[in-house]
Image: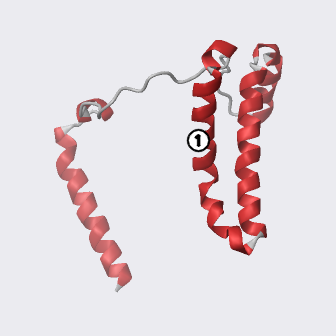
Amino acid sequence: IRIPSAVRVQVLLKEIFSNVSEFNYKTILLGCSSILVILTIKNVGLRYESMKWIKPFGSLTVCILTILLSYLLQFQNRGIPIVGTIPSGLPPITINQWLPLRTDLAVPAITLVIVGFLESIGTAQ
């Protein structure tokens, strides 16, 4: 589903609800049940003192459970989209594609960094 970005919430909600027939109910059900499991684990950790160690593991538990369910139940064959294979290794370093480096701005940028650093040291003293 393609939902255009909007500044106002009411415009965004209108776009979402006008395309509600295109939503995949299986994906929504899986997402809502995942959130419910995370909140349940968090509440168990908050409510019972002896189980407080379990609170931070909610997201990890849901991640492992959904991976196992996806593998065992073959989600892709049941109409639930999956990520697919993730390439191994690290991507190549491409700093020049992150932002265009302009050498003419290097000296003023370094000067501003030094001034900011010295100002923060002066404020801390």
- Left or right, residue 125 beside residue 44: left
The structure residue drawn at horizontal position 66% and vertical position 19%, both measured from the top left corner, is 80
Residue 73, picture quadrant = top right
**Is 10 situated above or below 123?**
above
Q: Position of residue 63 (x, y in %)?
A: 58, 41
- Left or right, residue 92 beside residue 30: left
- Which residue, as the protein is rendered here, is positioned at the far front? 72
Residue 11, picture quadrant = top right
Q: Helix, strand, or loop for circle 1?
A: helix
Q: Position of residue 32 (x, y in %)?
A: 76, 37
Q: Amino acid at mark 1?
A: Cys
Residue placed most toward the observer, 14 or 52:
52
Which residue matches tag 1?
A: 63
**Pointer 1 local density, CA inside 10 Å: few below 14, some 14–19, many at least 20:** some
Q: Position of residue 82 (x, y in %)?
A: 57, 22
**Is 109 situated above or below 2?**
below
The structure residue drawn at horizontal position 57% and vertical position 34%, both measured from the top left corner, is 67
